[in-house]
Image (cartoon, rainbow, N blue to C red):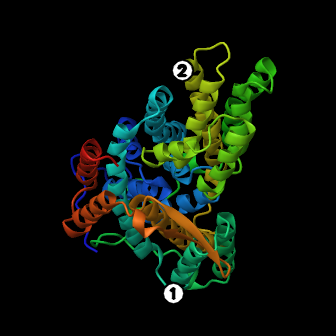
């Protein structure tokens, strides 16, 4: 596939140069603002900008970091931003990249939550995101193709990717089992010395080739600050653990366990350590608890919140912010309902994402220094192949829920498959997505103009006919 024209309006840096922190902040803000479409779209945007356009890190290092993040609880794309930010600019880089990644989604869902609580209708604003969502589908498809062609270098890797897709899409095998199985296969293969489990190298000078780590701005060597430092790891972990759990303990001590703020803090702190496999692995449980146990939401409102999260930038798990918002809005105590709801939204976001920084800062230095370990490299290369299957599964899921208004589950013969209801095909979404695919693949259009055009078209459709 021919290369897509990249943004050359910003400064570029040679291998070994130091990237100014202010420049990095601008790029991370851009990544965050364009991070639609769930983890598949977010990883695609990050790879597109950080690896292909800016050439700040190489393909091998990007996939190595992604593989580690896929093993962690929480949103893998946000954690990947923290990891790369930390690689480039130490602790402040990881904090800035991770915080900026969450900020646009937080502000968008907060604004939509205000409108929802006040009027119960966010249709016009969602029209804007409806168009973006359809456009992002083309970006997601591009990511599957580009990452797949670079990661699946031999029949074994292709087989692992296909097996991962089938396990997830057809059999609903739990995500951790898929990743662990791939890792074990790769570990055994790598330890045996099989070349099938060795990450390919080579310089990326030719068009269409993967960017080698040595040709990236960061280079191939492990930065000094990224080497294991037990004192730093323990110190930063202790600080993050305190920032996460001390507010929870304070709320329990001063407000009691039955207060809505205490309930929000405890419940979503628990969710932060069990969200393996992405948001959808736990959202059904969150919805059940929010409606039946805590009475934070009315039946069906979780779908409205999920619609906000799916059509705004940032991690899909950000939907929990809406849950906390509505819970405090309906049980504000002595506070103004909107003030209480805002505080609960901040609290929910805080206890959901602070642990993500903890997992990265605690483990990344030890993972980074093992990039050349044969057994670990084999395990992570197999996980990389499985991740292609995971992204393909997410792309299909995202496509089904973008192009159809209703998707049902069919079960039989041991299968559990999402089947679209063809009578509910969303023609405007099909048209916009097709236009995005043609623009990106056929005319090699840049990502931002395509997304802006789709957003404008989505808003226009909403104003004239409704979504």
Mark on residue 155? 1
User: The N terminus is located in which quarter?
Assistant: bottom left
* Residue shown at 45% from the left, 57% from the top: 43
x then y, percent, for residue 281: 64, 56
Quarter of the image where one finds residue 256: top right
Find the distance from the CA under tag 2 to the CA under tag 1: 56 Å
x then y, percent, for residue 198: 55, 77
Q: Nearer the viewer, residue 90 or 281?
A: 281
Quarter of the image where one finds residue 292: top right
Residue at the front extreme of this rendering: 423
Mark on residue 338? 2
Determine crowd level at label 1: few under 14, some 14-19, many 20+ residues with C-alpha closer than 10 A: few
Left or right of 219 on screen, residue 332: right
339 relative to 374, above or below: above
Is residue 171 something that shows in the picture? yes
Q: Are marks 2 and 1 in contact (CB under 8 Å)?
A: no
SS type, badge 1: helix
107 relative to 194, above or below: above
Q: Earlier in the sequence, mark 2 or mark 1?
A: 1
Determine crowd level at label 2: few under 14, some 14-19, many 20+ residues with C-alpha closer than 10 A: some
Mark on residue 57? none
Q: How many marks?
A: 2
* Residue shown at 69% from the left, 50% from the top: 285
Q: Nearer the viewer, residue 432 or 80?
A: 432
Is residue 86 something that shows in the picture? no
Q: Nearer the viewer, residue 450 or 183?
A: 450
x then y, percent, for residue 333: 68, 17
SS type, badge 2: helix
x then y, percent, for residue 349: 58, 35
């Amino acid at each position: 596939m021919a290369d897509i024209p990249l943004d050359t309006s910003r400064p570029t840096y040679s291998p070994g140069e130091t990237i100014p922190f202010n420049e990095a902040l601008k790029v991370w803000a851009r990544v965050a603002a364009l991070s639609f479409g769930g983890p598949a779209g977010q990883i695609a945007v990050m790879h597109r900008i950080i690896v292909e356009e800016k050439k700040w890190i190489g393909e091998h290092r990007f996939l190595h970091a992604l593989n580690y993040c896929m093993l962690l609880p929480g949103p893998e794309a946000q954690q990947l931003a923290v990891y790369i930010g930390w690689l480039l600019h130490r602790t402040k880089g990881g904090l800035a990249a991770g915080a900026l990644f969450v900020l646009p989604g937080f502000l968008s869902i907060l604004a939509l939550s205000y409108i929802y609580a006040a009027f119960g209708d966010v249709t016009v604003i969602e029209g804007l995101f409806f168009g973006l969502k359809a456009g992002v589908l083309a970006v997601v498809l591009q990511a599957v193709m580009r990452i797949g062609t670079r990661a699946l270098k031999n029949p074994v890797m292709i087989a692992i990717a296909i097996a991962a897709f089938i396990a997830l899409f057809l059999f609903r095998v739990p995500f951790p089992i898929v990743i662990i199985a791939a890792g074990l296969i790769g570990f055994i293969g790598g330890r045996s010395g099989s070349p099938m489990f060795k990450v390919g190298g080579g310089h990326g000078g030719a068009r269409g080739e993967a960017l080698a780590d040595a040709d990236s701005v960061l280079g191939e060597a492990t930065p000094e600050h990224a080497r294991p430092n037990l004192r730093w790891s323990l110190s930063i972990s202790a600080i993050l653990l305190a920032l996460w759990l001390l507010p929870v303990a304070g709320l329990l001590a001063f407000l009691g366990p039955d207060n809505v703020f205490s309930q929000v803090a405890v419940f979503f702190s628990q969710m932060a350590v069990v969200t393996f496999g992405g948001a959808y692995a736990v959202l059904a449980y969150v919805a059940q608890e929010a409606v039946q146990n805590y009475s934070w939401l009315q039946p069906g409102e979780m779908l409205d919140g999920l619609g906000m999260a799916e059509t705004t930038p940032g991690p899909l798990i950000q939907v929990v912010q809406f849950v906390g918002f509505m819970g405090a809005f309906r049980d504000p105590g002595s506070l103004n309902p909107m003030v209480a709801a805002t505080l609960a939204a901040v609290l929910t976001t805080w206890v959901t994402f602070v642990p993500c920084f903890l997992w990265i800062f605690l483990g990344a230095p030890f993972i980074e220094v093992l990039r050349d370990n044969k057994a670990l490299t084999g395990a992570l290369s197999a996980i990389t192949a499985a991740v292609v299957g995971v992204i393909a599964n997410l792309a299909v899921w995202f496509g089904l829920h973008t192009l159809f208004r209703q998707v049902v589950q069919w079960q039989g013969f041991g299968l559990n498959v999402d089947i679209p209801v063809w009578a509910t095909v969303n023609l405007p979404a099909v048209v916009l997505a097709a236009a995005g695919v043609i623009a990106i693949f056929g005319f090699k259009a840049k990502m931002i103009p395509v997304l802006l055009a789709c957003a404008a078209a989505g808003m226009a459709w909403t104003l004239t006919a409704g979504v």
